[in-house]
Amino acid sequence: MKKIVILGTGIMAVGIAAGFLANGHSVILLGRSKERAESQLGEIAQVTKEINPDWTPESCPIIFGSITEWDDWQDVIWVIETIKEDMALKQALFADLDHRVPSHIPIGSNSSGFPISKIATNLKTAHRMFNAHYFMPAHIVPLVEVVLGENSDPLMGEEVCKMYREAGKKPVLVRKDIPGFLANRIQHALMREALSLVDAGIATPDDVDTAVRYSFGFRYAAVGPMTQKEISGWEGMAGASIEIWPSLYNVKELQPVMAKLIEDGKYGMKSKEGFRKWTDEEMKEMRRKYSARLKGAFEVLQIEPD
């Protein structure tokens, strides 16, 4: 059976492990200690059952171990780290994996902020190292960004994408190691404009959410922006762009409205206040709705292949 090694025991590791287990792979979960890794068994089993009710530990087993002590790489086809977002820690881990993991096995980092080119700086086998960026929750959101570093082998990157497609995900190959990769760059462009509209008093945060969810966000669940314009026509897009683009927000600093939130310690649900205050009951209900809507969207996307 094909084996996937996952380094780390946090929420991303749980979702990634569940995704592979539910789709027919065996998983080796490595933590700071074997005991720490084993403590995640209940959560992983629960999430895996949500994806594939027929999964059992016997059908696709999960094995636990220590990051520093593990040395069995037989039948392993992919190694991915999900440890703390600390550049020095990641560099040290990859330097260790550089000589411990057989050179034919590709290695990925789930880092959303650190480029693989820097994580794998000066390593002998940097050609088999990639960013492999998931979006939370990892077991529901289909996308995985496979990012080529300066020394990554593009053909091996294609093989990693193939592996992810076979595991039920929707990978994209990002061919240059740039800040934000692909999806986050698009997401940040949208957020910069949305916050600028709120900051200027043109719309409320709730109105922004409604406008996105029930217009182009609604359409993008069916097809992406490029295909949508293939359907509607690029000449219409070009005409509107001449009018709209010059007025779009393009300042590089944080918008005052967001800077003030951060200054006041209003981080959103984690501090029980962002643009609005949140009670424990409201947070629980919104997270329930969010998860249910994501699962519903995922089911809709599976109606027919692209």
Image: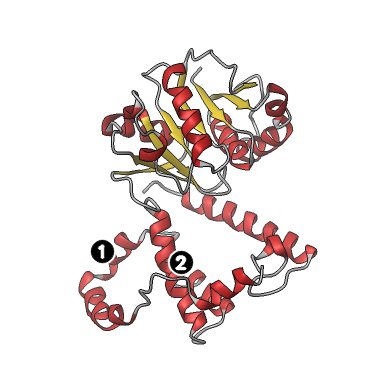
- Quarter of the image where one finds residue 148: top left
Query: Which disc, if any, is residue 135?
Result: none
Q: Which residue is mark 1?
A: 230
The location of residue 32, given as percent across then percent down, is 65, 27
Q: Residue at x 27, y 84 (%)?
A: 243
Question: From this viewpoint, is residue 63 visible?
Answer: no
Asked which colour scheme the image uses, the reply is: secondary structure
Q: CA distance from mark 1 to mark 2?
A: 17 Å
Residue lying furthest left in this view? Answer: 235
Q: Which residue is mark 2?
A: 217
Camera-side residue of 38 and 42: 38
Q: Amino acid at mark 1?
A: Glu
152 over 75 or under it: above or below: below
The location of residue 183, given as percent across then percent down, is 41, 54
147 over 269 or under it: above or below: above
Q: Amino acid at mark 2?
A: Gly
Q: Secondary structure at mark 2?
A: helix
Q: Residue at x 38, y 74 (%)?
A: 251
Instruction: Look at the numbered discs 1 and 2 and tell me whether their residues touch, using CB distance below 8 Å.
Output: no
Q: Earlier in the sequence, mark 1 or mark 2?
A: 2
Q: Nearer the viewer, mark 1 or mark 2?
A: 2
- Quarter of the image where one finds residue 6: top right
The location of residue 19, given as percent across then percent down, is 55, 36
Camera-side residue of 32 and 171: 32
Q: Secondary structure at mark 1?
A: helix
The location of residue 249, given as percent across then percent down, is 38, 77
Q: Residues within 10 Å of mark 2 (few under 14, many from 20)?
A: some
Question: From this viewpoint, is residue 21 visible?
Answer: yes
Q: Residue at x 68, y 75 (%)?
A: 276
Residue lying furthest bottom in this view? Answer: 201
